[in-house]
Image: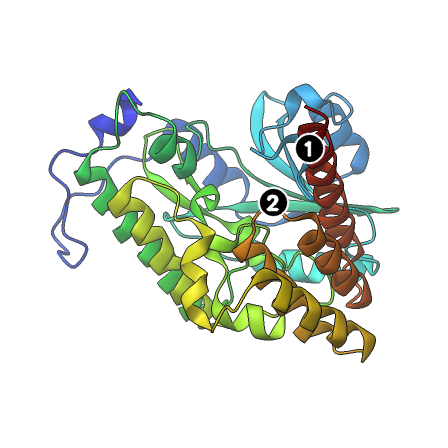
Amino acid sequence: MGCLHSKTANLPSSDDPSAPTKPESVNGDQVEQENQNFKEFDLTELRKATNGFSPSCIVSEGGEKAPNVVYRGKLEGNHLVAIKRFSRQSWPDAQQFVVEATGVGKLRNKRLVSLIGCCAEGDERLLVAEYMPNDTLSKHLFHWEKQPLPWEMRVRIADYIAQALDHCYNENRKIYHDLNAYRILFDEEGDPRLSTFGLMKNSSDGKSYSTNLAYTPPEFLRTGRVIPESVIFSYGTILLDLLSGKHIPPTHLVGIMPVPSATVFARRAFSYLMTDQQELALRDAMQAQVCIPEWPTAFYLQALALSKLGMESDAQDMLSDGAAYDAKRQNSWRC
C-alpha cells in the first residue's frame, strides 16, 4: 500500500496540459518497447511460463472456481505477464478469437493494461497482458481496514478510469464487459489502470454474464446482453464503491422494477422457461436471487435459463453455486 499512498500527492488536474507527467516504470517502458506489435504465443511457451498452469500461479481472486482463470506467468528474460485462460468451448472458432484479441491488442494508452498477445491452439484460448504487481482496486478498497485508501487516490482512480474508458470509446471499443473493482489494477508505480481483458467478449456469441449483481446494469437483467450504455451504469457503481469504501449490496437492484417476492419471480421464471422465453426467465431468476441471495432454487433456474441460452460454462457455475447453498441449508437443518 505504500506505493499507493506515495502517488496521491499533488494530484494533477485531468484537463491541465501543463501538469507534469510521471515517469514510466522500468517494466512499463520495457513492455511498450517490446510489445508494440501484438504476438501470437505458442501454447508450449505459456505452459512453461505458468508451470503447466499450476494453481500456485493463479492470481485471479476467484481462484480455480472462476469461469476464466488468470495466471501470473514468467516468459523468457524473466518478463512477467498475466495470462487469462478462457473456459473450454467459450470460443469454438480459433480464428474469430484471434481476430477479436488482435483488435483489442491494438489499443495502447497509459491508462490501460496493454494486451500483448494471445494463443489459440486446440481447445485452448488464452490472452496475455502486462502484469500489474500491486493488486486490484477491490483488494485495496475493501480489504485494508487498518489503512484505508486515501481520498486523493480515490479521485485519481475515478479520473484515470474515466480517461481509459473515454479512450476505448474513441477507438470504437464502446463495450466493456463486466466493469467492476476487480478490473482496476495498480501498476509498478502505484497508478490505477484498466484491464483490457474486459474489452474481450467472454464468449464468441457476445453474451456476457456477470456473477456480481451489484455491477449488473438493468438492461442486462431485461435482455441478457451488454450495450455501450452499460458502461455508464457500471462506472457509476464503481464511483459508489470509491465513495463508500464498501461493496454495494445486490439489493440496490430491487428498485429497478417491482419486486413482489422471490417465489413470484421464481414461478414466473419457470413459466417463461416452459414457453421458451429464456431471456425473460433469466431476468426473473436473477431477481429471485436479489430477494433471497442464497436461495438454491434461484440458482437452479438461472442455470437452466443460461443453458438454454447456450451459456454452458455460466450454467455450470450457477448449478455448482446452487448445490453448494443447498448443501449448506441441509447441514444447518441437521444442526
In the image, residue 42 sits, relative to residue 155, either above or below, namely above
Q: Which of 107 and 62 is in front in this view?
A: 62
Image point (71%, 59%), residue name: 302
Q: What residue is shown at x 63% (from left), y 58% (from top)?
A: 209
Would residue 54 appear left or right of 76 to someone viewing this image? right
The amino acid type of the residue labelled 1 equals Lys
Query: What is the crowding at mark 2: few (fewer than 14 residues within 10 Å), some, or many (at least 20)?
Result: some
Q: Kindly tell me whether residue 235 is visible in this rendering.
A: yes
Dividing the picture into quadrants, the one containing residue 100 is: bottom right
Give amino acid for label 2.
Glu
Residue 178 in view in this figure: no
Left or right: residue 300 versus residue 60 is right
Residue 241 percent across, percent down from the top left: 33, 47
What residue lies at 80% left-to-right and 64% top-to-bottom? 310
Circle 1 packing at 10 Å, graded few (<14), some (14-19), many (20+), is few
Query: Residue 85 or 264: which is nearer the viewer?
Result: 264
* Earlier residue among tags 1 and 2: 2
Residue assigned mark 2: 294
Relative side of 57 to 270, left or right: left
Q: How far apart are marks 1 and 2 (CA)?
A: 10 Å
Describe the colour scheme in one phrase.
Answer: rainbow
Q: Where is residue 15 in the image (x, y as percent from the top left)?
A: 16, 59
Q: Quadrant of residue 210?
A: bottom right
Mark 1 touches mark 2? (CB < 8 Å): yes
Q: Name the residue tied to disc 1.
A: 328
Element on which disc 2 rests: loop
Q: Nearer the viewer, residue 266 or 92?
A: 266
Quadrant the C terminus occupies: top right
Q: Where is residue 83 in the image (x, y as percent from the top left)?
A: 64, 37
Look at the numbered disc 1 and give the secondary structure of its residue: helix
| Percent of width and height locating residue 286 | 60, 61
